[in-house]
Amino acid sequence: MATIKDVAALAGVSISTVSRTLSGIAPVSDETREAVMKAVEELNYQPNVLAQGLKRGRSNLISLIIPNIMNPIFPAVARGVEDRARNMGFNVILCNTDEKLDVEEDYVKKLQMRWVDGYIFATASGNSAHIRELHGQGVPVVLLIRGMDLAVDQIVLDNFKGAYEAVSYLISQGNGSVAIYNGRTDIELYQERYNGYLKALEDAGIPFDENLVLGSAQNAEQTNTYPSVMEMLEKGLRPDAIFVASDPMALGVMRAIRDFGLRVPDDISVIGFDNLEFSAMLEPPLTTVSQPLYKMGALAAERLIKRIERKGASKPPRIFRINSKLIVRHTVKAK
């Protein structure tokens, strides 16, 4: 197996010149670079990436930590992170936590031993003390999708505005009573969507009815919306519309309405949140709030790598609140 010494001898330069050429940490002439790269190719030399990383204090590895890649919002997010990271010379380690705090903490401990340069967390919640600890140690951290009260770069949707616009649209179409199926309110984005729902009701002069709140922290582990909607309908509660805080949850809502013998949107209107690819393929196609998931993932990778490379590292962290867009299809009855 060829060594760096062999490359230097064939190229007619010093070992340190070969190292500078391959690492890119110092300038070399075009002539020298051409000679070194020609020798590398002829000898099929494979640099010791770990040793190079130790010398410059970086591994060029970042970690993306998500709840579950099977959740339809995360493939686009992950691809955005990976594409931008690769373009900037970094590789990505993907970790699925299944919303289990011990699993996430174990990942972090193991990744720290493998010289990961920084972390993108799409898992932040009120229990994320380990994220605060990493930040306190000076480890570059970016929050994605889910924000928290922490002075790091955060790429999040304007969830309040998205929910407010969705519920206001439902009301504008003559829906006087609007239920909500929400996610875990210990996760900031769901609390923001809930607050947007409340504000839209308030501004329209519609009294809040706690019986129409179908998701909360009390049923945080419930992922199937079907039973809750069926229970509500069986009690005789029949709202004009349901605002659902994610497209996957909207699937169960629509199925429950149909199985109860009602129709969407003739009997109950439905709006989702995410604008996942399948939402346009439902029958009827789902009206929903769109968030640019790929773009958000790419921006998260860019911000993290700039922090790692100390480009603009002295600048204070920013919260990027990305605008959503209401996508009107056919699950809301026209006025």
Image (spheres, grey):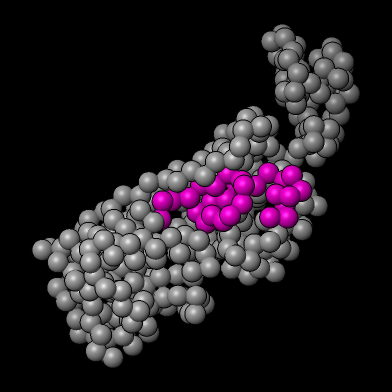
Instruction: List x then y, in percent, for residue 320.
Output: 48, 43
* 197 lies left or right of 61: left
Residue stretch in magenta: 132-159
The quarter of the rendered structure image containing the C terminus is: bottom left
Note whether residue 48 is visible.
no
In the rendered image, the vertical position of residue 75 relative to residue 67, given as above or below? above
The quarter of the rendered structure image containing the N terminus is: top right
Residue 79 magenta-highlighted? no
In the rendered image, the vertical position of residue 41 relative to residue 78, given as above or below? above
Farthest left residue? 335
Work out whether residue 210 or residue 134 is closer to the camera in this orientation and state it: 210
Farthest bottom residue? 235
Residue visible at 35% across and 55% down?
A: 162
Residue 142 magenta-highlighted? yes
Residue visible at 41% across and 55% down?
A: 159
In the rendered image, the vertical position of residue 182 relative to residue 306, given as above or below? below
Residue visible at 31% across and 68% down?
A: 243
Work out whether residue 43 or residue 90 is closer to the camera in this orientation and state it: 90
Work out whether residue 240 or residue 106 is closer to the camera in this orientation and state it: 240
